[in-house]
Image: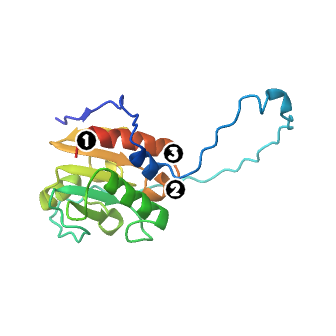
């Protein structure tokens, strides 16, 4: 029987300006309310959007591997924190994705000594059980890797969940997340709940 606990994300607000600066890098401007009014808008005619049909490809579902694997990772894994990324083109992610990961790690007070950073594209079809057995992981952050790819039940994105005494957060890949303000807010709220 699979036991999965999901913590709520009720406390997602922070007043810590240093933490907010790491996640929100765009300038914000306050305007007087009377500067713009709905009457100033110009109605635009509706433009039809052309539709195209796409042939769906059949995808072969490959079960996760269960044999033992020797993983090569960045970091020293002294606190048994596994950070999984998925990027077939880069060692970790694009430059915006790597910058976001550096900011996340810094915001939660981790160093490279604390975690093992692995690119799942290097170890496709590897199961959660293999990672846990080989790396003795107690915490998992997955960026661009789904619970299904690891042989786990589905969970909400950016939410803290627990499976076999391992706290986990699954999120989109780092490059996409770097431009997703709402996703970063949700992720930050979950990271604060983990008390690392």
Q: Determine whether, in the image, residue 81 is placed left or right of residue 62.
A: left
Between the residue at mark 2 and the residue at mark 3, the CA separation in whole angstroms equals 32 Å
Q: Determine whether, in the image, residue 72 is placed left or right of residue 175.
A: left
- Helix, strand or loop at mark 3: helix
Q: Is residue 125 visible?
A: yes
Placement of 184 over or under 95, stated as above or below: above
Residue at 52% across, 52% down: 25
The mark lying in front, picked from 2 and 3, is 3
Q: Mark 3 = which residue?
A: 181
Q: Are marks 1 and 3 in contact (CB under 8 Å)?
A: no
Q: Mark 2 = which residue?
A: 57
Disc 3 residue crowd, few under 14, some 14–19, many 20+, Cα 10 Å: few
Residue at 21% across, 49% down: 139
- Helix, strand or loop at mark 1: loop
Q: Position of residue 28 (x, y in %)?
A: 60, 44
Q: Position of residue 180 (x, y in %)?
A: 51, 48
């Amino acid at each position: 029987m699979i036991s999965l606990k999901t913590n709520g994300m009720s406390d997602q607000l922070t007043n810590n300006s240093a933490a907010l600066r790491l996640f929100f890098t765009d300038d914000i401007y306050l305007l007087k309310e009377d500067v713009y009014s709905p009457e100033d808008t110009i109605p635009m005619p509706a433009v039809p959007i052309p539709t195209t049909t796409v042939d769906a490809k059949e995808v072969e579902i490959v079960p996760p591997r269960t044999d033992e694997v020797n993983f090569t990772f960045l970091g020293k894994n002294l606190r048994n924190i596994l950070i999984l990324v998925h990027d077939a083109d880069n060692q970790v992610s694009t430059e915006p994705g790597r910058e976001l990961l550096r900011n996340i790690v810094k915001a939660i007070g981790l160093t490279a000594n604390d975690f093992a950073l692995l690119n799942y594209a290097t170890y496709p079809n590897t199961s959660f059980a293999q990672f846990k057995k080989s790396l003795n992981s107690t915490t998992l952050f997955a960026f661009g890797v789904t619970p299904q790819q690891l042989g786990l039940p589905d969970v909400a994105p950016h939410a803290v969940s627990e499976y076999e005494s391992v706290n986990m957060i699954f999120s989109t890949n780092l490059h996409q997340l770097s431009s997703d303000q709402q996703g970063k807010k949700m992720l930050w709220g979950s990271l604060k709940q983990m008390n690392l």
